[in-house]
Amino acid sequence: MIKFDNVQKVYPNGTTALQNIDLKIEQGEFVAIIGLSGAGKSTLIRCINKMHDISSGTLTVNDTNVSTLKGKEVRIFRKKIGMIFQSFNLITRSNVLKNVLVSSVPDLKGWRKLLGIFTKEDKIQALDALDKVGILDKAYIRVDQLSGGQQQRVALARTLARNPEIILADEPVASLDPVTAKSVMNDLKRINQETNVTILLNIHHVELALEYCDRVIGIRQGRVVYDGSSDKITQETLDEIYGRNEQAAKV
Ligand code: ADP
């Protein structure tokens, strides 16, 4: 379970990105965070795996108080949390399998990693992850020869190979065309259902969030303004999340 209790995040330059955040996300949920650019979506996601530290309040992930983690503890904690990004973050000159292996075997000694020496089990696990996202046939293709959608699937396979309990996805479909974006959302939903991994993603395509995710959290200026089922959200609430009411009032 991911639990925010009255969490605040203030960046060193004084920007308050999150205010009074209270949230509880159970294992296996598929949650979208929506809101305008600058609302705090990315900050919220990145506090969960301690890429950013919260300023006050308590953030607990599976009974671990994230703020208390230090050094090696952070590395161990992050093993259970996969992260995917808009920009895929792949080694484009290496093949697909190598990309999955290099990060799915994070404790590999430097020289083994450098020489690309992986065990049979490592390879089976990596190939299995590629199979789960439907690109097993691309295992020996260089990443820079793949489409954007295929590259995002490699990133997803790389995360899955580590058997995460939680996947955090920071705008995972923002750089994809609408059809490919839908198919990647479909993959995420299927993986969520098949493996019970918790998926928390932020997304600016509200219609994709509503179509694929079970729960939506709407953020406006660092505060939660909606938290509930995606099929119950009203147009009025969406207008509030996206600040349209005020724009209309100003006109
Ligand atoms: P979103 O993901 O919804 O676009 P962010 O979480 O990136 O929003 O940003 C929330 C607020 O925090 C914005 O005002 C942004 O400018 C600010 N912010 C984000 N990252 C930093 C940072 N590293 N230093 C200072 N301010 C930041």
Image: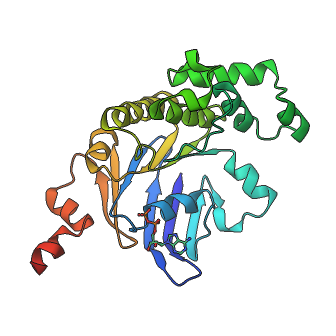
In front of the other: 210 or 114:
114
Q: Residue at x 73, y 57 (%)?
A: 74
- Residue 19 percent location from the top left of the image: 44, 76
Q: Nearer the viewer, residue 135 or 207?
A: 135
Q: Is residue 59 left or right of residue 31?
A: right
**In the image as oriented, which residue stretches furthest toward the top?**
137
Task: List x then y, in percent, for residue 66.
Answer: 65, 62
Q: Tell me residue 112's x, y (percent).
A: 88, 33
Residue 145, given in percent of the width and then of the height, sits at 55, 27
Q: Residue at x 71, y 29 (%)?
A: 98
The tally of labels here is: 0
Residue at the location (63% across, 61% down)?
Answer: 50
93 left or right, relative to 86 = right
Q: Quadrant of residue 101?
A: top right
Q: Is residue 163 above or below residue 26?
A: above
Asked which colour scheme the image uses, the reply is rainbow
Residue extending farthest to the bottom is: 14
The quarter in which the C terminus is drawn is bottom left
Residue 219 lies left or right of residue 23; in this view the side is left
Determine the image quadrant of residue 136: top right
Q: Residue at x 35, y 38 (%)?
A: 177
